[in-house]
Amino acid sequence: MRGENRKILCFSLLLCIFLASCAPSGAPPEAGPDDTLCSYLDAVLQGRFEDAYAYLSSSDRAARSLADYLAVRSEEGSFVARLLTRKASYRIKQVVVTGDRARCDTEVTIPDFKKVFREIDGESLTGEFTESNMENLSLVRRKIGHVEAKYRREGVPMKTVVESFWLVKEKDGWRVSLSGEKSVSGSRARSSI
């Protein structure tokens, strides 16, 4: 019986060693340029600009302080813009990595703001206001309500473009480069997102 227990114990020990060697290492895999860009774009689209700033390259952060970055992206009083941008989306179509540089060609879809404002402007209120605030309120509700009802029926007009985002690999991983650092193709470009 003792010999049989030793065999079971040895077999169990060898099995544990084998299984442990097959287990994935505890270190998380390094995020690729597409993962970093997704995190950055998600933060921007959700209005989490402090988080987005953390994904910028060290040269971008050195050139623009967090306070300056936030000042340009202030959403104070932009209720309508927040409602419209909830429909914004993106899809990374291609990632080209060359050494410590990467280009991510990304399909970005947002409301067609030119068309939206053109339609609102088309419902112009100029010259129709009276001295009665209550009449003016009704007028604005009717005019804006017409556009809103149209968008509920037909959907908000959207615009899709392919934008290229450049990333650089730094000591702590991939970072988004808005400063126009050289791209994979050798040309320079800027992104303001």
Image (cartoon, grey):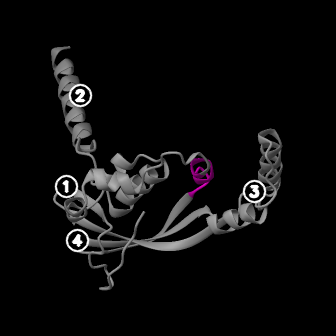
Q: CA distance from mark 3 to mark 2?
A: 63 Å
Q: CA distance from mark 2 to mark 1?
A: 41 Å
Which comes sooner in the sequence, label 4 or label 1? 4
Q: State which mark lies toward you, 3 or 2.
A: 3
Q: Residue 179, percent across and down? A: 29, 70
123 in relation to 191, above or below: above
Q: Are marks 3 and 2 in contact (CB under 8 Å)?
A: no
Q: CA distance from mark 4 to mark 1?
A: 12 Å
Which comes sooner in the sequence, label 3 or label 1? 3
Q: State which mark lies toward you, 4 or 3.
A: 3
Q: Which mark is residue 12?
A: 2
Q: Residue 106, percent across and down? A: 48, 69
Helix, strand or loop at label 3? It is loop
Q: Amino acid at mark 4?
A: Asp
Q: Which residues are magenta?
A: 81-88
Q: Amino acid at mark 2?
A: Ser
Q: Which mark is residue 74?
A: none
Q: Find disc 4 in the rendering and name its residue.
A: 100
Q: Find disc 1 in the rendering and name its residue.
A: 172
If the image is split into quadrants, where does the C terminus sit?
A: bottom left
Q: Local crowd at mark 1 within 10 Å, few (<14), some, or many (≥20)?
A: few
Q: Residue 185, percent across and down? A: 33, 84
Q: CA distance from mark 2 to mark 4?
A: 46 Å
Which comes sooner in the sequence, label 4 or label 3? 4
> How many circles with numbers are drawn on the protein?
4
Q: Which mark is residue 155?
A: 3
Q: CA distance from mark 4 to mark 3?
A: 42 Å
Q: Residue 154, percent across and down? A: 80, 58
